Amino acid sequence: MKILEERLKRGEGEIKLLAESLDDLWHLKYIVEPGDLVHALTYRRMEEISDKIRSEKREKKPVYLGVRVEGVELHRFSNRLRIHGVIEEGGESGSYHTLNIEPGDNLKITKLWRKDQLERIKEAVENSSRSSILILTIEEGYASCGKLCEFGVEELFTCTGSRRKRRDDSKGKDFFDEVMGHLRQIPAEFDLLVVAGPGFVKDEFVARLRAQDQELSSKLTVLDTQS
């Protein structure tokens, strides 16, 4: 998270923030509350006088709105914070609208700030510079990868494959290639890749990864686990 602007007087005023990750959206869920005024760029079908006599669907247009908050929801699987309330600034005042905040979006929050909310913003800003860690667990015929976040683990992908009858079965190589393909599609902003799992499958996968992908191998840490 980044602080873009801050105008406070005696604990009241506005702070403009840039949400950079799902962790930031999680923090914002506990910062934004009913009664706050939140401004953000959004998309809305703006109604004009001539539209009232038309039945066709109007195209959504970008518009900067100020919404008096009534509810906040974090949708983890769509990487989106939904801020619902009544429009006060930007057009169609009095109408309901939902602001969808995603990583990369900025928003301006105007409110009477509590000390714990300001401390949470400071914490989010500091944590944005910490190492990003991926955890891949792999065993025979199954792999799961997630990103370690402040709220828990964000699942990135899972893979399933056929169980091999022999260790030299080509099905294992195909399964490893599929897992590596998913890893390569993940944005490269992570610092550490932890591979964990029981038995020889993990070791075979790590050996194949080191032989085929130098970039991923440079971030690799291996852990043994019990089955």
Image: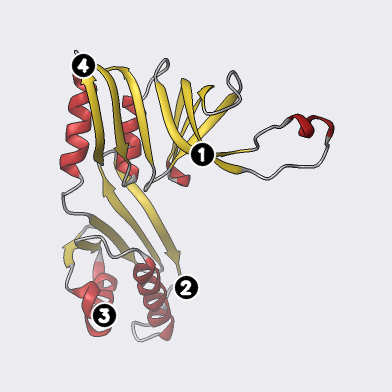
Tags 4 and 2 in contact by the CB under 8 Å rule?
no
Closer to viewer: mark 4 or mark 2: 4
Question: For the residue marked with disc 1, what is the amino acid?
Answer: Thr
Q: Quadrant of the C terminus?
A: bottom left
Question: 139 or 194: nearer the eye?
Answer: 194
The residue under label 4 is which amino acid type? Lys
Question: Alpha carbon of mark 3 to alpha carbon of mark 2: how far?
Answer: 24 Å
Q: Which residue is mark 4?
A: 9
Question: Could one spot residue 227 in this view of the protein?
Answer: no
Which of marks 4 and 3 precedes in the sequence? Answer: 4
Residue 212 pos. (x, y %): 27, 84
Spatial CA span between label 3 and label 1:
40 Å
Specify whether 94 is left or right of 8. Answer: right
- Other residues around mark 3 within 10 Å, as few (<14) / some (14–19) / many (≥20): few
Query: Label 4's element?
Result: strand
Residue 214 lies, in percent from the top left, at 21, 80
Q: Which residue is mark 1?
A: 42
Q: Residues within 10 Å of mark 1 (few under 14, many from 20)?
A: some
Mark whose residue sits in front, 1 or 2: 1
Instruction: Give the SS element for disc 1.
Output: strand
| Pair 1/4: label in front | 4
